[in-house]
Image (cartoon, grey):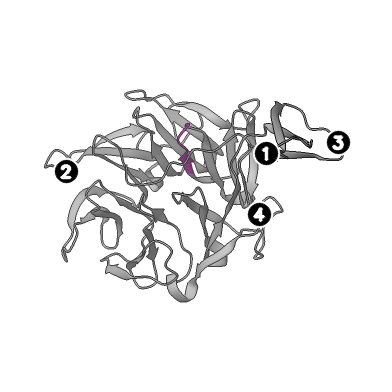
Amino acid sequence: MTFNRPTFSPYASWNPNGITFTTSSIIGSSPYEILINNDNTIYIPNRSINRILIWSNNATIPKGNISINSSNLFSVFLDKNNAIYTDISSSYYGINKWSINSTNPIQMIYSCTPCYDIFIDIANNLYCSMTGNHQVLKKSLNISSYTYETVAGVPGVTGSTARYLYNPYGIFVDTNFDLYVADCSNNRIQFFPPNQFDGTTLVGSTVPGTITLSCPTDVKLDADKYLFIVNTNNHRIIGSGPNGFRCIIGCSGSGAGSNTLNTPWSMSFDSAGNIYVTDLANNRIQKFILLYNKSRKFVKLIRIYFTTFYNHSTFLQYSKNSHRNNLETGWNYVCR
């Protein structure tokens, strides 16, 4: 796996005020994609100059870039050998592979419309979210051919029932080869088990107990398979857990402040669980720091002071499940 899937507690929280990681002066306008691999190297397409910019761990300026022969870069992904896969949007469409130290790409998929998102699963299968044709393609990278198959959606046909997609964008494939699709114009997240062409709606207004979406464009899973969704037209990030769905970033509406987003498009975790968001209409990348990632189990420390022959102090510690509003003198509460 070349990207991060952190483990979060049910009560994990992020600083609502983001840090601007980079702006249009570096990445150009309208950034669509960000990828952070498991050593925290960051890849961001600059669509203005047709290059993939690369930051090393903790760097503030790019350490390098790769020139891409494409007029509009939407997506980027890495395979297990750190070869880079990008979409092609010039005189033709598809996905190119750029091996390390290579100056010439290899075309892996030809498509009739751009691949707005790319994914590679643990079995080395390449996926393309072909938004304009309302389908998701899959091709084995273990076979030297251009043959691919449709694994979700009906080519060229829109719809809102189980078999159809309508402008799919972000995709994610877990270790069970289950496919998750951000089905933008249907305002839902669709789930497709392997070899199943009728999807199940996991999140959306038609699913009781979830949350209403407005053009989701990206979906990620954490280590426990909880969903994180870029809810683009509502300008916020949604997280799920054992307690259901909640807004975790951009919960005050759209804007250009540190605590707001304007048309966020994609997101990525670093290894510490911090969230990076492409804030498309603000032409910037925002970083939101993970503040709290522990369970709310309060441990009450009762300090009993007494004088003995050896003049020792003894500390007794025991768990308490509920928080007391009025703390008694000498009692402290510690979150684990």
SS assignment at label 2: loop
**Which residue: 69% across, 31% down?**
317
Q: Given this view, does label 3 or label 2 mark the residue nearer the observer?
A: 3
Relative to residue 287, is residue 245 depicted above or below?
Answer: above
Q: Nearer the viewer, mark 4 or mark 3?
A: 3
User: Residue 245 at what x, y percent from top left?
Assistant: 63, 35
Magenta stretch: give its range. 219-224
Residue 333 can be seen, yes or no: yes
Q: Could you tell me which secondary element the residue under label 1 belongs to?
A: strand
> Of the numbered discs in the image, which one, if any, rests on residue 335?
1
Residue farthest toward the front in the current orientation of the protein: 309
Give the residue type that dot 2 points to: Tyr
Cα–Cα span, label 4 and label 2: 45 Å
In the rendered image, which residue does mark 4 sit on?
16
Find out whether residue 137 is within the magenta segment. no
**Which residue appears at 45% of the width and 51% of the height?**
270
CB under 8 Å between callouts 3 and 1?
no
- Residue type at numbered disc 3: Asn
For numbered disc 4, what is the local secondary structure?
Answer: loop
- Residue 173 located left or right of residue 146: right
Identified by mark 4, the residue type is: Pro
In the displayed structure, 283 sits above or below 4; it is below
Q: Which residue is mark 2?
A: 146
Quickly name the residue at label 3.
325
Whole-angstrom CA distance, mark 1 to mark 4, is 21 Å
Q: Quadrant of residue 174?
A: top left
Q: Label 1 amino acid?
A: Cys
Distance of label 4 from label 3 (alpha carbons): 26 Å
Q: Left or right? Give the position of 123 relative to 242.
A: left
